Amino acid sequence: MCAYCRPEFWHDAHDFRFFAASKCWPRFSDFSEVLIWINVAAQVIRNLDQWYLAVVYAAGFAAGSFVGMWIESRLAMGHQMVRVISKRETNLANKLWELNYAVVEMEGKTKAGEVDILFVAEKRRNVPKLLRKIYEIDNEAFFTVEDVKQVGLKSRDPSVVWGERVLSDVADWVHLPARSKTKK
């Protein structure tokens, strides 16, 4: 059993984020999904003369997939990596730094000329706002968005302690001021 599934780990609602992002949640979800599928498939096979059961099951499966994707998009948990290719003269990286985005900039070259390749790790719920800002600054920028498992130096292991020194080192690396921790 992973550390996040143990009852002593649960202290408040804040801990749900760690559980949802841990390896336990997908296992529980997959187990439940397979259990339901086996029971429903058994009903359909036992009653092959009632064809509408198969149609209802297929419709239910499709509706469940749609609702699940909709809920996941509304929860918007986790992080995404936005990769942007922009013309060098637009100076997109500096403008995003001014807006306090953590941007890593690399130089690149295409047939059309010199470009900047930017990597921005951002919370999923903030990505649409970031993409709007990128479009406002450079409406010809090319970008891709991808889900990432983990961002930064933070580990999912609760025994790992990382303090202000590590945060300030990371802040210097991505050209952002260190965020101070406030007690609740």
Image (cartoon, rainbow, N blue to C red):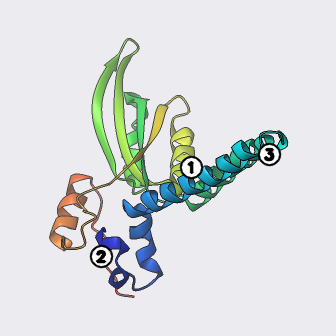
Local crowd size for mark 3, using a 10 Å CA cut-off: few (<14), some (14–19), many (≥20): some
Amino acid tagged 1: Pro
Q: Position of residue 172 (x, y in %)?
A: 21, 58
The structure residue drawn at horizontal position 57% and vertical position 61%, both measured from the top left corner, is 75
Q: In front: 124, or 128?
A: 124
Amino acid tagged 2: Ser
Between marks 3 and 1 in the image, the one whose residue lies nearer the viewer: 3
Q: Circle 3 sits in a helix, a strand or a loop, which is it?
A: helix
The structure residue drawn at horizontal position 51% and vertical position 35%, both measured from the top left corner, is 138
Query: Of marks 3 and 1, which one's residue comes earlier in the chain?
Result: 3
Q: In front: 74, or 23?
A: 23
The structure residue drawn at horizontal position 35% and vertical position 31%, both measured from the top left corner, is 116
Q: Quadrant of the C terminus?
A: bottom left
Residue 66 in view (yes/no): no
Query: Which residue carries the number 3 mark?
Result: 53
Judge whether 168 appears above or below 127 on screen. below
**Left or right position of 17 against 154:** right
Query: Which residue carries the number 1 mark?
Result: 128
